[in-house]
Amino acid sequence: MIHIRPYHELCSGIVLLCSSLIGCNRAKGTFVKCFDVQLRLVMAASASIPPYPPEIRLVLLGSVDEGKRSAGNTILGREEFSSQKTAECVTKHGWVGPRQVTVINTPGWGREQRLSQTPVNVRQQLLQSVFPPGAHALILVIRADRNFTESNRVALQDHMELLGERVWDHTIVLFTCVDWLGDAPIEKFITSEGMPLQWVVEKSSYKYYCINNSDRADTTQVSRLLEMIEMVVAGNQGHFELDRETCEREKERAEDQKKAIQVMQQRALEMRKSWHTQPPIMRRQSYLLNPPKMSGGTYADIKDMKIEVSAEEPGAYLTPPLTPFTDRCDSMSPPPSMSGGTHFFLSTGEHGDLTQHPTPSSYHNQSKHRIGPKLVPSYDQHSCSPGDDPILSCHFPSKTNAVVMEIRWFKGTDCIYLYKDGQEREGRGYEGRVSLSKGKLKKGSINLTLRKIQQNDIGNYVCQILHEHGYECAFRINYSPYNNKFVIYPGPHIADEDRVKMEASTQDLVSGGPQIVDQDRMQLEASTQDSGSSAYLSTF
């Protein structure tokens, strides 16, 4: 049985018919778009209906890169919100027909980021956006050209609960990038995304709307959105603002954070004052962590400092390399002649080996603390058809020469392509399907061509580059059955445990994968030496 329910439910029961009805099949979990009908209000009950507000205040909510800025510009009918990202709310005003509209664009949260991981200033800005005088409607912006996963839903729920449970009564889900769906209705997209997105739509009492930001000439889509907002105001008999209890709780939290910062500052001041009273070795450590201004005799004192270490019987002894865990623990115990335990553990190794064969953990540390250039995607998003040959492209902004670097490409944690020491190796299932544009390596462009893209190619892809530092760039390939298109865009962060599997997959490919001799590399290296490749490599 299909239950039809309006997305506007006026408490006073003054609605006879609504302008858009949503049918929900509870058994199958599907959504059916019904026909539009005229909204009739009972004139006799007009005294109980709050009048439409002279000004409509809207708050745009959502994660990063959901299209909030473009949606705000479409609502106001002109470019008001700049493309520059900000960590603060941005408020713009305008007239839409006879209505005065105020739009507040809030900073976004990470698509898979829990509330505890969101910066404090972003949380405070979300709360301030609904401080008095509040908002008539909260527009929750979601892109229709990306998957909406359970982790996205949990992150969204976390941040919406920050504003209180009543926030859903005033929330309208606004889908952007709907032109990517082609002629397919938005209900088909909601159904195909499964329970995570259906939960969001149901939580908002099926108040959702679609907007095409690329077709701003169609003013009817904005007019109908404002009509929906007016019905939401009537249904809730007023606007939404943060209740006093939540305001007080957030005020207390802000005060606690302010006190914590003051305590940290006081501790730092005390550490600075006690610096000269510390032992020499501790003074040098403090200098390295927090160097003073290079003036007067301070730097000279540090530079000329001599640290003397005295011991009756030096207890330096070697531990066996790469022994089982229990043996390593035994080796850390002091010999019978020593007392007081071990003072220092000194890790030794050959620098060349670490450079040529980085472990996953050392690679992760290199990528965090690298001093060299950064590897970034060459585009935000592009699409292709089945059977096409798309290119996964990233580059060094400084045009660093990548000819002599080790280049790895992964799908998930499986190495599908390896370029190292003038040789190429292709992973299982990708023989003859992947190739590197080696002619562009000299300018720092890392382009992997994926031939004849198909359904099996959907997933996460990662480019890793190893030289004197480690670099990473992630991509995601999705497929839309609505317009039969693949879409490629920057991918998610890589977990540390995945790096271990990626390293193992690379070693398996080196030991058993098909090897292809690169005949072009010699010419590239020769031209590189002529043009002075050392100038490029010195930037690492």
Image (cartoon, grey):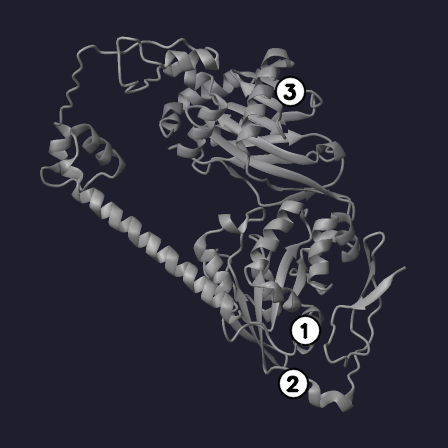
- Residue 277 position (above or below residue 263): above
Residue at point 62%, 67% (across, down): 166
As helix, strand or loop, the secondary structure at mark 3 comes to strand
Residue 461 visible at all: yes
Residue at point 47%, 25% (across, down): 361
Q: Which residue is mark 2?
A: 51
Corner quadrant of residue 293: top left
Q: Amino acid at mark 1?
A: Val
Corner quadrant of residue 102: bottom right
Residue at point 70%, 68% (across, down): 221
In x, y percent, where is residue 537? 39, 26
As helix, strand or loop, the secondary structure at mark 2 comes to loop
Label 3 or label 1, whichever comes before in sequence order: 1
Q: Amino acid at mark 3?
A: Glu
Q: Amino acid at mark 2?
A: Pro
In x, y percent, where is residue 210? 71, 62
- Residue 476 position (above or below residue 206): above
Q: CA distance from mark 3 to mark 1?
A: 57 Å
In x, y percent, where is residue 347? 35, 17
Residue 268 versus residue 64: which sits nearer the camera? 268
- Residue 75 position (above or below residue 432): below
Q: Which residue is mark 1?
A: 232
Q: Is residue 4 left or right of residue 418?
A: right
Q: CA distance from mark 3 to mark 2?
A: 68 Å
Residue 126 shows which numbered tag?
none
Q: Which residue is mark 3?
A: 426
As helix, strand or loop, the secondary structure at mark 1 comes to helix
Give yes or no for contact between labels 3 and 2 (Cβ–Cβ under 8 Å).
no
